[in-house]
Image (cartoon, helix red, strand yellow):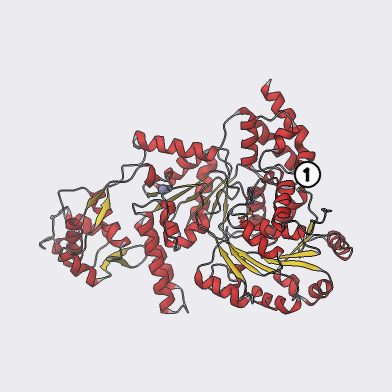
Amino acid sequence: MSLPAPERSENPLDAARETLRRVFGHPEFRGLQADVISEILAGRDAVAILPTGGGKSVCYQIPALLRDGLAIVVSPLIALMQDQVATLRDLGVRAARLDSSLPPDERLSVLAALSEGALDLLYISPEGLMSGAGLDRLRHAKISLIAIDEAHCVSQWGHDFRPEYRMLGRLAEIFPQAPRLAVTATADRETQADIRRQLRLDHARTFVASFDRPNLILAAERKDNAKKRIVELVTARRGLAGIVYAGTRDATEDIAQKLTEAGVPALAYHAGLDPRVRADRQHRFQNDDDVVMAATIAFGMGVDKPDVRFVIHADAPRSIEAYWQEVGRAGRDGAPAEGFALYGAGDLRRTLRFIEDSGGVDPAVKAAQAKKARQLFTYLDGMTCRRAGVRRYFGEENVDVCSVCDICLEPPASVDASEWASKAVAAVLRTDQRFGRARVINHLMGRPPMNAADEQYATKTTYGIGADVDEAHWRAVFDQLLFDGVLTEGGEDMRPVVQVADEAAVRALFKKELPVRIREPAKKAGRRSPEERRADRAARKGAVLNETPLFAALRAWRREKAEEQKVPPYVIFHDATLAAIADARPKTLTDLSRIGGVGEAKLKRYGASVLSICAELAA
Ligand code: ADP
Ligand code: ZN
């Protein structure tokens, strides 16, 4: 794109802000964007850890437009490159990608554009860049900057280790003049240190943003007829794109089928599917604005769709990191989006089993993973604000509550369960740690023995000492002891046996030195209280954004345009932009240009059609 060169005397950040407005249509920088951009514009390296939806791409796209020469963007997945390049082109930016999926003629035209200096940004995979041919082609070009996207892939501590990323450290000596920027959304301290070391960015300033995601509305519930609940949650959000994460392949198929039967366009996605089927389904999800994907975590990093309006965990994830990464796929566009997690003691058991069975893993790493799993359940089942809980977990201080999550809206009542907890543990010990939770509960409640083993234990002092409360209550007590790591479930996966995990904790419990609190037992699904239904509706309003006919008409128009141009709808305009247009009902191009997300190129290309739709629906 031919931008006028910024005047020498001008503050470089003013030029950057001007580009943000003119090209991207955003009035102001968000969070740490301005700081990161200043660093790159000054020709210095940087590392930026910004939350999903925090606007990482602008951090290198704007310097790419302002600095002389070609910006190289290293990206781990073709889907991510396609998406970014399509979005940039629609903004009128000269961007292209070089990857193995490109048809030969397109490849030739990209190479021609490269040698003519007709590109501002080139997206390329790490192996494509570091191959002999790749480097030869670029070695003599003027490189304005190098951006390394999803930089956590360089670290084996991260979730998505990609050995090819390790080669990228050499860029420091191959392109010594070009400032390098590593960006990612998820990097704990170890991963950050690895990024700096491996990518030779030790001297670079690191920018770490808050982990807050102000547009996320979060909730978690103990499982109770989970399948039915999922159908209920999804059908209440009909017409919105969402992801339902499940722990097994079968579960994804089953959920997709149940949703389809309920009239929701739903697809299953897991690693057992043929790669072509997977690619096809991912494409449909990406390109439609109302498809729900029931998926295992195989549906992961490539999911860059900005208008995912909800993420539901049908089974709990493995850690708070994983939870945040997965929930974080909702609402990248900054518009309201929801996260629901359903969880139960069975999920914790599955995770712990998985950790235990992973071969060749250092026992210290296993212990750390098991701790992370317990922390997740304590969090999900806890009583602190959802968003504040995550932020504190990631080390943020002085965190405010979100005031929109389930806990903030309706603080759960808790009761002191220490007495019941002691009885439960005593029963586990008296029955020789041989029984599963259900049988220990039968024993506590003094139910008639079912076989000789039960009968033998029916003489113990713990038999029938818990007949005063109901089964749901006992399940909550056991869940709490399991979540807290006082008890554990061993034995075979299908027939887990409850055992003592922490003897010191048990002694403390018996000495009344370890208080145990539980949330008031959940009400039965289907008999939700009026408050709960109100909270559901309020949350739904949050994600639906705008229910006016104008918004619907704009979405329909956008879908048509997207089909014409063979791009996903959000490449044309984001949901939030359409919602803002539907609110503002602009009458002139000037009115329209004031709306966030409407830059110069969009105004020229779509302004007239948008105004005519607004006029039509006003009449
Ligand atoms: P990330 O890669 O960090 O998840 P993106 O770079 O894809 O985020 O940006 C997320 C969304 O936020 C995009 O739709 C982008 O257009 C928008 N965005 C980026 N910067 C700003 C800004 N300063 N003001 C408003 N919206 C922004
Ligand atoms: Zn909250």
Residue at x 32% of width, y 61% of height: 483
Q: Which residue is mark 1?
A: 601
Q: Is residue 450 among the parts visible in the rendering? A: no
| Disc 1: CA contacts within 10 A as few (<14), some (14-19) or many (>=20) | some
Q: Could you tell me which secondary element the residue under label 1 belongs to? A: helix
Indicate left or right for 415 with 203 as reference: left
Q: For the view shown, which residue lies furthest in the front direction?
A: 9
Indicate left or right for 560 with 233 as reference: right
Q: For the view shown, which residue lies furthest in the top direction?
A: 619
- Give the total of numbered labels: 1
Question: Residue 602 versus residue 13: which sits nearer the camera?
Answer: 13
What kind of residue is marked 1?
Ala
Q: Percent x, y for residue 475?
A: 27, 53
Question: Residue 455 versus residue 299: which sits nearer the camera?
Answer: 299
Q: Percent x, y for residue 293?
A: 56, 49
User: Where on the picture, by quarter, is residue 266?
Assistant: top right
Which quarter shows the C terminus?
top right
Q: Percent x, y for residue 520?
A: 27, 47
> In the image, is residue 612 above or below residue 602?
above
User: Where on the picture, by quarter, is residue 480?
Assistant: bottom left
Indicate left or right for 62 with 153 as reference: right
